[in-house]
Amino acid sequence: MKLLNLLFVFIFICSVMSFPYERKSERKEKRVQYAAWDDVNVLAHGLLQLGQGLKEHVDKTKGQMRDISVKLKVFNSSVTELSRLSQRLQEDSEFLKAKAQSLEEREGQILNISSDLQEKAEELLRDRQKVHEKMNKLEEKVDGMMQGEGLNMAGGNHSDARIIQWMLEAQNQRIDELVERIKQQQDKLDKQNIRLRTLQSQIQTRSERQKEDETQQNENAEQRDSPVALSSDCHDLFLRGERANGVYTVQPADSLPFEVSCEMTSEGGWTVIQRRQDGSVDFDQLWDAYQSGFGSLDGEFWLGLEKIYHVTKDKDYFLKIQMSDWRDDHQTVKYRFRLNGEESGYSLRILAPSAGHLESALSSESSGLAFSTRDKDNDQKNDLNCAKHLSGGWWFSNCGRSNLNGRYFITAPPKQRHQRKQGVFWKTWRGRYYPLKSTAMMIAPAEIENK
């Protein structure tokens, strides 16, 4: 609107200045009339305002173009990721279809075998009935011979009775063998049926999981296409008004959206990166699992080194660790830290000592401490792989100060010390060989301290 007003002023001035001559009635000569100095100033001022308005409009347009370019890059990366996931789901679907077809064929073969075996079993039962009838007749004859009904028991007759008795025993033995074979065949059929039902259940579970993944991908796509930007972490959600604990979707800078477990407190929102409470999840995982994350956000889980890095990479964060023992005593330590990227092995650098009276069990070296797993040894022990010697993945220094991702002992811990040291421990609280009952690790921006 401002730009249009300036244009109207400019056109009006030009129209006023477009008649430099005036006609004199008495003399018929023409004389040049120059514009007044004030008119020139007004024209120059209008042109300056016009140029300033155009410059502001161009700058604003450039900023909008930059925002659009950034959003297009994020959208293109999202589309690429979705296409990759769709292709993987399609491959899984084709594999499942082929496996289902193979199972149907095997089921048909087993049904045919089952029907054949059933026919043979019926035939054997009929033969058995006939044999029983013959045996009954033979037994009647033998009884008659033994009781001397019209026959004497001398010589050859006694020998015939023994032959008949032997034949009866042989027939009984054969019948018993046939019955045993039928039982074995029936057991095999039962096992095949159980295996078929198990495979069908697995296929159904994978199909349902595939549908859930597709639904989740569609929801993520809708969230990415939404004009409202997602929060970068749980504290950002807290600042936007969220106060309930639970699972939320966040999207740090230069990252795809992912779900996190949030713990909201009076001071702000904490993003939970690890939880141990019942031993339901095996934490003795390889590097790829620790990098991408594993477990369930509603129970035990590890969020993933790459996700933790994207959340914390732009500023300092606090790491808060909550622990409990088997007497339900609790302890909390808090560090100011920075986490480096994959090129440094996700090295953890402690910027300030732990808050509280408890001595730190994490290395405070200025260079940081790289993360280690049993298939990627980054610890400072030259002659030993700490992750393989203990259990799980952790920021190990010399294997001895802490490991919150160790083995969880559901029952009473073993008596042998070399087995107990594989557990979840924090040396400066309950000691090197005391397996903890529960742990939770969570992070929040350093600015939360000023709240």
Image (spheres, rainbow, N blue to C red):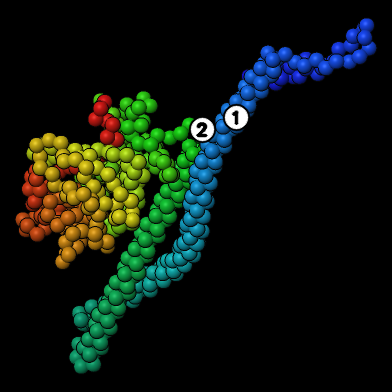
Q: Badge 2 local density, few (<14 within 10 Å), some, or many (20+)? A: few
Q: In the image, what residue occupies the spot 52% across and 44% down?
A: 73
Taking 258 as reference, is 183 left or right? left
Can the viewer see residue 314? yes
Asked whether the beta carbons under mark 2 and mark 1 sit within 8 Å of each other, the answer is: no
Give the quarter of the image for residue 331: top left
> Judging from the image, what secondary structure is the residue with disc 1 in?
helix
Q: In the image, what residue occupies the spot 25% across and 27% down?
A: 450
Q: Gap between marks 2 and 1, in whole Å? A: 28 Å
Q: What residue is shown with label 2?
A: 227
Taking 451 as reference, is 23 left or right? right
Amino acid, disc 1: Lys
Q: Quadrant of the C terminus?
A: top left
Q: In the image, what residue occupies the spot 35% across and 62% down?
A: 190
Q: Badge 1 local density, few (<14 within 10 Å), some, or many (20+)? A: few
Q: Is residue 441 above or below residue 265?
A: below
